[in-house]
Image (cartoon, rainbow, N blue to C red):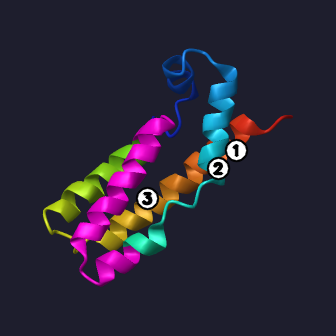
Amino acid sequence: METHFDDEELRQRLGGDRKLFADTLRMFLAAPSHRADEMREAAVSGDAGRLTKLAHSLRGVALTISAPRLAELAAALEERARAGEIGDAAERIGQIEEEYVIVRQAVSFMTDPR
């Protein structure tokens, strides 16, 4: 089973600081989306450099909140874009979008005060 969001790993990495944990998740939820539209525009226009930067940024966010599958998908897109191989970018971006929704739901659940 793939891990979409590893709250325990994040808690450990943050030294068990509950406030920092909650703040980190709130920042993720409040931040602009995963920028799939921008990634798609870069791919369509053939801008592999921009696509590389966007995927790299998303990978960093995913690693920060302990979302390993999202980080893996972003890293794969980043690697392909860096190599100038963006023919399959639309499919990869679609996978990223699907995973982002799953991670966002998991993070939202963790921040729900109920």
Residue 91: percent from the left, percent from the top? 35, 69
Quadrant containing the C terminus is top right
Give the amino acid type for the residue marked by disc 1 in the picture. Answer: Ser
Sequence-wise, the earlier of marks 2 and 3 is 2
Numbered marks: total: 3
Q: Which residue is mark 2?
A: 29
Say which quarter of the image contains residue 94: bottom left
| Label of residue 108 in the image | 1
Task: Compare residues 107 and 16 and report the one nearer the observer.
Answer: 16
Sequence-wise, the earlier of marks 1 and 3 is 3
Query: Range of the magenta residues?
Result: 40-68
Distance between mark 2 and mark 3 Cα atoms: 16 Å
Q: Which residue is mark 3?
A: 96
Circle 3 — which element?
helix
Residue 10: percent from the left, percent from the top? 53, 26
Q: Nearer the viewer, mark 1 or mark 2?
A: 2
Residue 76: percent from the left, percent from the top? 27, 53
In the rendered image, the residue lying farthest to the left is 83
